[in-house]
Image (cartoon, rainbow, N blue to C red):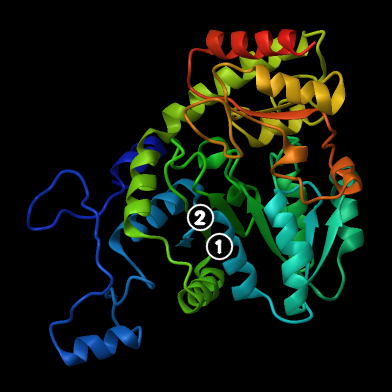
Amino acid sequence: MSEWREETWAIRTQMKPTQQAEHSVPVYLTSSYTFDNAETMRAAFADEVRHHIYGRYTNPNVDELVEKVCRLEGAESGHAAATGMAALFGTFGGLLQVGDQIVAGRAIFGTTHTLLTKWLPRFGIAHTLVDLSGGVDAFADAITAATKILLVETPTNPGVEIVDLEALAGLAHERGLIMVVDNTFATPVLQKPIRHGADLVFQSATKFLDGQGRVLGGVMVGPEELIKDIRLFCRTTGPALGAFDAWVISKGMETLFLRMERHSANALALAHRLEGSADVESVRYPFLPSHPAHALARKQMKAGGAMVAFAVKGGLDRGRRFLDALQMCTLTPNLGDTRTIVTHPASTTHSKLTDGERAAVGIGPGLVRVSVGLEAVEDIVEDVEQALAASR
C-alpha cells in the first residue's frame, strides 16, 4: 500500500472495519471507552499502551482525519481541535511560555492578528509583525533572543501574497526557531510546506478540507516532538474536535483533489476576466503573470487555488454596491465552499484592524475577496460582471 498515490490515500485512509464489516466508517459517538481489566486501564493512562480513554483525548474519527492530513502533508504526527483557531492557539499554548516572542508576517487572518495582538500579550507572549515586502531580511531583522516561532500564511488572507518558504525555513533553522505555516488557502493538494522546510503546518479544516461549509475544525501537523506538547495542552484545556465533525471533514477530503483542481481552474478564469475589466483597479491571483510573486507561486504550488482578491474602482461605497448587486454568489465570511463566496475584508474578517493596519497589508476600502466555487465558471463570471455594471 505504500506505493499508493496521494489521491488514493485521501480516499482510502480510514479506520479498519468493525465486526459489522461496514464499508463506510461509522461515527463513534461516545464520550468514553471501556477496558477489559484494571491493568489495561492503568497502562492506558500511563501511556504504555495505545487505547482510547476519553473523548477529550482521542476518538477514532479524529484519528482518521489526522492520519489523512499527515499523509497528504508529509508529516510524522498531528493533532486536531474543534476549530482552526483552537488548533492555532493550542500550538502557541503548547510550545510557548512567558517571555517568548512570535515573529509573524503582517498579512494574516484577522482573528490570528487579534490573537497575537490582544490575547497572547496577557500571557506574556510578545509578537512582531513583519511586512512581507521586506522578504527574509525583514524577518531576520525582527528576530530577537526571545523569538521562538516564525508564523506565515501563503497565500495570505486576503491579499493572496506569496511567501518564499524555502528561504524562510532556512532562516528559521539557522536561528533554531520553529516555522509554522498556515496552509489553509493552498491545502496539501496544491502546496506542501514541509517539503520546503516548514516544521509545523496548519489547516483550518473548516475551509477546503470539509469543502461544503458544514462543520468546524482545525489540524496542526509536524514532528511528534512538537506535536506531543500541542496535544497535551489541548487535552488539558479541552478544545476537542467532535466525532461527527471529524467524520464529515474526513469524508469531504475524499473529493479534495478533484475540488481543488476545479476551484483553481475557475479562479484563474475569473481572475483573467477581472484583469480586463474597466471597473477593477487591480487583481491578485498567484497564477496570473501580473502577480508580483508569480514565478515563486509556480515553484511552490501546483495551481493557484480558489482565492482571488481585487479592488473595485470607487472605494468603499462602490464595493458595497457591488456586493449588494450579486445575484448568485453568496455573502458570508467563510471560504472554501463548493459555492462561490464574496467577502469585503475591511468591514468583516479584518474589521478589528485599524485603518493603518489594513493599509499596511494592502486591504483597501474597495478590496473584495472571492472564494471561487465549483459552479459553471460562466455563471460565476456573469454574476460578478453584472454586479460590477450595476454598481457604477
What amino acid is at disc 2?
Gly
- Left or right of 152 in this view: 136: right
Does residue 312 appear in this view? Answer: yes
Name the disc covering residue 102, or none: none
Q: Identify which residue, 387 or 141, lies in the foreground.
A: 387
Residues packed near mark 1 inside 10 Å, few (<14), some (14 to 19) or many (20 plus): many
Image quarter of residue 364: top right
Q: Position of residue 25 (x, y in %)?
A: 22, 49
* Residue that sits furthest to the left in the current view: 20
Query: Mark 2–mark 1 contact, CB under 8 Å?
Result: yes
Residues packed near mark 2 inside 10 Å, few (<14), some (14 to 19) or many (20 plus): many
- Left or right of 120 in this view: 1: left
For mark 2, give the secondary structure: strand
What amino acid is at disc 1?
Ala
Image quarter of residue 273: top right
| Sequence-first disc among 2 and 1 | 1
Q: Which residue is mark 2?
A: 218
How many numbered callouts? 2
For the C terminus, the quadrant is top right
Does residue 125 appear in this view? Answer: no
Name the disc covering residue 86, or none: 1
